C-alpha cells in the first residue's frame, strides 16, 4: 500500500484551434489506505486526473508521487497500480480465470501460486463457480466482479476505479456499491474512485474531491461537504434533490433582508456577517429540501433568525418514505421540499414554507 500525492497537476488538450484546460493545478494528498472519490459532472476533469495517476495520460505540469516515488515518467505497468475501467475491458476470448491470472502470468509467477491467488480472490468475490466461463456468458454484475478480481489478485499499492458501476442496473449498483466498500475495509488498499453520481460518492468515500471545469472546488468528508459547502457549486451538486437557491438583498437599514422579493428576513449573525462581506454583490440564500417545513398557509411562523415564505403547491411526488413537494413563490421562483409521507398537501393549495436560520446558507449569486 502507499500514499498518493498530486502537486499542481495540469492537463491541456488542443481541440481544433482552441486550447482546452481539462485539469487545472490540482493539489491532493491521499493517505495510505484511504478511499478518495473524485466526483463531479461530465467533463469536469475527474477521469483525466485518474488517467494521469495511472500513467495513461501525460501531465503538462506538476508532480505525481506514489509513496515517495515520483512517477511522472514511469510507465503504467511499473507504477504498481491496478485500474478497473467503466467497460471492464475483459479479454473476450479468455475465461474469467485467465483474465484474472493474466497479469500474474506476465510476471512469470509459478503456476501453483497463480492458481492459489486467483482461487483466493475468486472466493472473496463469490465468483469461484464462474472461473471457466468467458465474459459473454457472464451477467453485467459478474463481469464487474471479474474485473475487480483481476485488479485485486495483483495486490497493487493503489486501486483506481473509473465509474465501474455505471453500466449496472439500479438495484445491482446498490448491491455492488456495498460490496466495494466492504472489500476496501477488508483489504485497506489506497483507492481513488471516479463517479458522476453524488450519492455513490457520499456512500463510498472517506473523503470527496468535488471537481468542476477542471478545478477542485472542495475536499472533505462527505458530511463536511454536505453540511458546510464552501461555494454554490458544491452546495447545488451534492444532495438529491439539490439545494434550493433564492435571491437575497440587504435593505438600506442593513438590518433586514428581502428574500425572493417577499420575505423580510433578519439574518442570524453568521449569515449577516457573510452578507455584509458581500456588500452590493448579488447574493443567494440556500436551503436543502429536507430543511424546509411546509404547512397550511398561515399555520406556522419561522423561528428567530429563520425564514418564512408564502407559496403555492404545484406538484406532490410520493416516494414511499417521504414526499417531494414542488412549490411556486409569488415572484415565480420554485422550491422543492422533502417532507414526511404523512403530510396532507395537494396541488393548488396555498402553503407557508419555513426554515431555521441554522439550516440556511449564503453564497454570491455569480459564484
Image (cartoon, grey):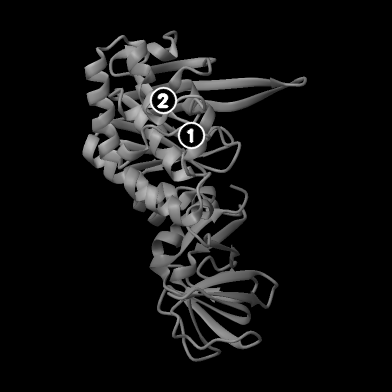
From the image, tell me which residue sits under label 2.
99
Q: Is residue 38 above or below residue 266?
A: above
Q: Residue at x 24, y 12 (%)?
A: 110
Which of pointers 2 and 1 lies earlier in the amino acid sequence?
2
Q: Quadrant of residue 154?
A: top left
Front position in the image: 241 or 270:
241
Mark 2 and mark 1 residues within 8 Å of each other at the beta carbon: yes
Residue 250 visible in rendering: yes
**SS for dot 1:** helix
Q: Residues within 10 Å of mark 2 (few under 14, many from 20)?
A: many
Q: Residue at x 44, y 70 (%)?
A: 291
- Mark number, residue 345: none
Q: Point out residue 228 in the picture as x, y percentages from the top left corner.
A: 40, 53
Locate the N terminus and report the quarter of the image it occupies.
top left
- Mark number, residue 135: 1
Q: Quadrant of residue 189?
A: top left
Front position in the image: 242 or 305:
242
Q: Residue at x 27, y 24 (%)?
A: 155
Q: Residues within 10 Å of mark 1 (few under 14, many from 20)?
A: many
Front position in the image: 43 or 153:
153
Residue 276 visible in rendering: no
Q: Point out residue 95 in the picture as x, y percentages from the top left corner.
A: 43, 28
Amino acid at each position: 500500500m502507499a500514499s498518493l500525492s498530486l502537486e499542481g497537476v495540469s492537463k491541456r488538450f488542443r481541440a481544433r484551434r482552441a486550447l482546452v484546460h481539462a485539469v487545472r493545478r490540482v493539489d491532493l494528498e491521499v493517505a495510505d489506505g484511504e478511499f478518495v472519490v473524485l466526483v463531479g459532472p461530465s467533463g469536469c476533469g475527474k477521469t483525466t486526473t485518474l488517467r494521469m495517476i495511472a500513467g495513461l495520460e501525460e501531465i503538462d505540469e506538476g508532480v505525481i508521487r506514489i509513496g515517495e516515488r515520483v512517477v511522472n515518467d514511469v510507465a503504467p505497468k511499473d507504477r504498481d497500480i491496478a485500474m478497473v475501467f467503466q467497460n471492464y475491458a475483459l479479454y473476450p476470448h479468455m475465461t474469467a480465470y485467465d483474465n484474472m491470472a493474466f497479469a500474474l502470468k506476465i510476471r512469470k509467477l509459478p503456476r501453483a501460486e497463480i492458481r492459489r491467488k486467483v482461487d483466493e480472490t475468486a472466493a472473496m468475490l463469490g465468483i469461484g463457480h464462474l472461473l471457466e466461463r468467458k465474459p459473454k456468458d457472464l451477467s453485467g454484475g459478474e463481469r464487474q466482479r471479474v474485473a475487480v478480481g483481476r485488479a485485486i489478485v495483483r495486490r497493487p499499492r493503489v486501486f483506481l476505479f473509473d465509474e465501474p458501476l455505471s453500466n449496472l442496473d439500479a438495484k445491482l449498483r446498490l448491491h455492488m456499491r456495498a460490496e466495494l466498500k466492504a472489500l476496501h475495509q477488508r483489504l485497506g488498499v489506497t483507492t481513488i474512485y471516479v463517479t458522476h453520481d453524488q450519492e455513490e460518492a457520499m456512500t463510498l468515500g472517506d473523503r470527496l474531491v468535488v471537481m468542476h471545469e477542471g478545478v477542485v472546488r472542495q475536499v472533505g468528508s462527505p458530511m463536511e461537504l454536505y453540511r458546510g459547502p464552501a461555494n454554490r457549486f458544491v452546495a447545488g451538486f451534492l444532495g438529491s434533490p439539490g439545494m434550493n437557491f433564492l435571491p437575497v438583498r440587504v435593505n438600506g437599514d442593513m438590518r433586514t433582508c428581502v428574500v425572493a422579493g417577499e420575505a423580510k428576513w433578519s439574518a442570524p449573525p453568521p449569515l449577516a456577517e457573510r452578507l455584509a462581506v458581500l456588500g452590493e454583490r448579488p447574493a443567494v440564500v440556500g436551503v436543502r429540501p429536507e430543511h424546509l417545513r411546509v404547512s397550511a398557509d398561515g399555520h406556522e411562523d419561522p423561528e428567530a433568525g429563520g425564514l418564512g415564505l408564502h407559496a403555492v403547491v404545484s406538484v406532490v411526488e410520493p416516494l414511499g418514505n417521504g414526499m417531494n413537494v414542488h412549490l411556486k413563490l409569488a415572484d415565480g421562483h420554485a422550491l422543492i421540499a422533502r417532507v414526511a409521507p404523512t403530510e396532507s398537501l395537494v396541488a393548488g393549495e396555498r402553503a407557508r414554507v419555513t426554515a431555521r436560520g441554522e439550516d440556511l446558507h449564503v453564497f454570491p449569486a455569480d459564484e
